[in-house]
Image: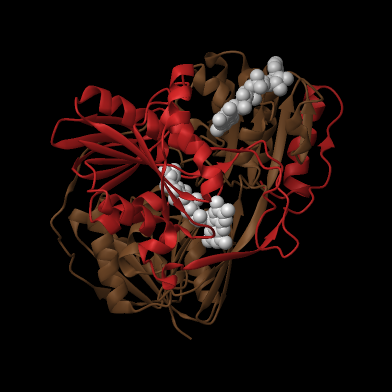
Chain colours: A brown, B red
């Protein structure tokens, strides 16, 4: 058995669900699980990391690591990898994970499989399955010539069980490495939404041109509020300027993998399906019974979105408060 | 100054994917290949940067099967690129692809700015630009929707989670991974297409780059089509009945609430 290193991401001192998925999967493999956490609040999540499977937590508690910088994070991850000597490194295919770990792989002269949806760890070996060609097929990534096998997993792909509050971990504090940087993050412009990002959301309510105009997106936001969902959109409405590009789901937008995707007034063009066909349950609401979206959907409703969505919001309110 | 753009040729999204009998890849017969959509933004930005800086040149570079990817290189030339290079190779992974790109850029005397797409829509990996930056020992930013060059540094806007953006300044040379929103890629003009047809595309054999076989780190196998979905369950009744039925199904049958 070897060691699995998990890059644990946190937000406001809470461990992200995607990181909990990875810790629990690593723990199930029977390997020693080491979590690494960055930033001045890194200490806040050591207990949560332990309760979800970490035997050891490496904490690099340094304010310089509070926000992401590719060069700085690469140097610090590499330094932790050199200390821990894991055979497998797991991270989430979040915007940080996707940006950071290819660079880490290149520096460590090792392999990486990105955007995976299935994970199989057996001893020191790992195979990961990922969608290819916009989800039209799947393939297994097999590592060769790799000292550390790096796998980036999409969020919401692995089961999460309750944390075991009786568990604790050995905490190792490590000082931050401070290389000379050629990259400077000058400013972070806050997004409009405090909701979970589409790529992490467990429930997504998405709207298309069938909503008729920008103002009607309010009915989707009302539904999303009741469900704790994030609102997404088709490219047609992004191009029309009804919503920002950050909300676009699809080939040239975001690839999402929620448990529940509700597509409202979206025709189901192949480029849209490319981004959401990995959703577990798909509900389509469309006034055209022949819309292609129904071929991908689990449940379909033919009707006027503006009539049905408010009714749904009421029904969910009743169901979720009983 | 020299500007490089790395481009990849990918199957068109509308293409039907068939798996080879050995399950080690896809059947490429009948596939329509196109320039990776994000790479169009990369080419456009490079051409705009060249036009704004007298004496500059745009070089496009692709690693792939030479007979095939030449078509995408010609598309980029028709959009305004000046020179094109193909590294003739098959079955590389992202690591060895990035190594090959880095070796060629170094051999051609380096570049001030290197553009790529944020990801290739076939592998959806978004890894080549970051690896390339590492092999060149230069900074990188991916998912870029705004770009400016001030003669010394580049300043870009990067889209991050929750609709937020980061403003990032990088010393040049730097690698920039283009996102949608960066610009509106131009259509190739007829004179552009005619000119592109006449251009000599420089060909390099992957073997001549002396990249060791151990630089292939990941191999894909076991290609499979997604499992058949059960047919959609259409809900009946008026909108109130449909709404309450849906909530029931999501709770009791699909168990997602
Ligand atoms: C015919 C064929 C067979 C293949 N067989 C295998 C295989 O058996 N095993 C395997 O692991 N992989 C295989 N691949 C994929 C392999 O080439 C790499 O995985 C791929 O190039 C890495 O890019 P990516 O899709 O991860 O790109 P990303 O990292 O998602 O791309 C980001 C950006 O990098 C640049 N870029 C990416 N690739 C290239 C390129 N080739 N040339 C120039 N710029 C590029 C582009 O600007 C692109 O927008 C095959 C590819 C082809 C075309
Ligand atoms: C290179 C490329 C990349 C692309 N990338 C993306 C991408 O990332 N994401 C994406 O989404 N698209 C993308 N597209 C665009 C895609 O092809 C479609 O044009 C787009 O998805 C259509 O959006 P839509 O379904 O909202 O609009 P439409 O196709 O106009 O569909 C509207 C639907 O609403 C229904 N409707 C109308 N009125 C009502 C009503 N009152 N109640 C209920 N339903 C109603 C209609 O029946 C119709 O099915 C891309 C295209 C290209 C060429």
Which x, y percent locates residue B257? 66, 46
Residue B125: percent from left, percent from top: 48, 52
At x 46%, y 41%, the residue is A197
Say whether residue B176 is visible.
yes
Q: Nearer the viewer, residue A53 or A222?
A: A53
Q: Residue A200 location, x and y as percent?
A: 50, 47
**Quarter-of-image position of residue B3:** top left
Location of residue A47 (image quadrant): bottom left
Q: On screen, B126 above or below A34?
A: above
Task: Reply above or below: B244 against A75.
Answer: above
Q: Is residue B36 visible?
A: no
| Along the line of sight, the residue nearer the viewer: B66 or A169 | B66
Q: Residue furthest right?
A: B236
- For image coordinates 22% across by 31% down, the residue present is B56
Position of residue A289 relative to residue A279, above or below, is above
Residue at image location 72% in from the left, 50% down from the top? B255
Residue B255 or A143: which is nearer the viewer? Answer: A143
In the image, A113: left or right of A312?
left
Q: Quadrant of residue A290?
A: top right
> If the image is split into quadrants, where does the N terminus of chain B sit?
top left
């Amino acid at each position: 058995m070897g060691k699995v290193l998990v890059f644990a991401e946190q937000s406001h001192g809470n461990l992200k669900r995607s990181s909990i998925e990875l810790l629990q999967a690593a723990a199930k493999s029977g390997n020693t699980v080491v979590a690494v956490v960055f930033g001045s609040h890194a200490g806040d999540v050591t207990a949560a990391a332990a309760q979800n499977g970490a035997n050891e937590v490496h904490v690099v508690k340094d304010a310089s690591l509070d926000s992401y910088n590719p060069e700085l994070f690469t140097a610090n991850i590499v330094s932790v990898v050199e200390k821990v000597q894991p055979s497998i490194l797991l991270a989430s295919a979040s915007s940080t994970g996707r940006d950071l770990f290819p660079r880490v792989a290149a520096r460590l002269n090792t392999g990486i499989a990105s955007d995976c949806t299935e994970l199989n760890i057996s001893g020191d070996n790992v195979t990961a399955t990922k969608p290819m060609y916009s989800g039209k097929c799947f393939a297994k990534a097999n590592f060769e010539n790799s000292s550390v096998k790096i796998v980036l997993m999409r969020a919401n792909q692995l089961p999460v069980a309750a944390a075991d509050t009786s568990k604790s971990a050995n905490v190792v504090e490590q000082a931050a490495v401070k290389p000379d940087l050629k990259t400077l993050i000058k400013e972070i412009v806050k997004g409009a939404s405090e909701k979970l990002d589409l790529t992490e959301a467990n429930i997504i309510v998405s709207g298309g041109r069938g909503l008729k105009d920008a103002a009607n997106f309010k009915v989707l936001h009302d539904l999303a509020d009741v469900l704790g969902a994030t609102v997404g959109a088709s490219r047609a409405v992004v191009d029309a300027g009804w919503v920002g590009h950050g909300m676009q789901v699809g080939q040239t937008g975001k690839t999402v993998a929620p448990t529940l995707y509700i597509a409202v007034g979206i025709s189901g063009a192949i480029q849209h399906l490319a981004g959401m066909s990995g959703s577990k349950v798909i509900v389509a609401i469309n006034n055209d019974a022949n819309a292609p979206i129904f071929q991908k959907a689990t449940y379909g409703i033919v009707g006027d979105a503006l009539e049905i969505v408010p009714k749904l919001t009421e029904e969910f309110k009743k169901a979720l408060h009983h | 100054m020299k500007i490089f753009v790395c481009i990849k040729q990918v199957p068109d999204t509308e293409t039907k994917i068939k798996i080879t009998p050995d399950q080690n890849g896809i059947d490429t017969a009948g596939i329509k290949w196109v320039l990776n959509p994000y790479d169009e933004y990369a080419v456009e930005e490079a051409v705009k940067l060249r036009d704004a800086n007298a004496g500059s040149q745009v070089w496009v570079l692709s690693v792939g099967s030479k007979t095939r990817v030449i078509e995408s290189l010609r598309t980029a030339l028709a959009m305004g690129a000046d020179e094109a290079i193909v590294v003739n190779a098959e079955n590389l992974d992202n690591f060895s692809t990035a190594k090959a790109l880095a070796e060629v850029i170094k051999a051609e005397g380096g570049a001030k700015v290197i553009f790529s797409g944020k990801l290739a829509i076939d592998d959806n990996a978004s890894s080549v630009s970051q690896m390339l930056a590492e092999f060149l020992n230069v900074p990188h930013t991916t998912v870029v929707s705004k770009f400016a060059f001030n003669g010394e540094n580049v300043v870009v806007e990067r889209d991050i989670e929750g609709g937020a953006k980061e403003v990032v300044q990088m010393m040049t040379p730097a690698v920039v991974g283009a996102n949608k929103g960066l610009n509106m890629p131009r259509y190739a003009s007829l004179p552009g297409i005619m000119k592109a047809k006449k251009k000599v595309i420089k060909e390099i054999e992957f073997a001549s780059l002396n990249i060791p076989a151990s630089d292939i780190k990941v191999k894909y196998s076991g290609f499979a089509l997604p499992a058949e979905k059960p047919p959609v369950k259409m809900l009946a009744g008026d909108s109130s009945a449909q709404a309450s039925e849906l909530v029931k199904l999501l709770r009791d049958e699909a168990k997602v609430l």
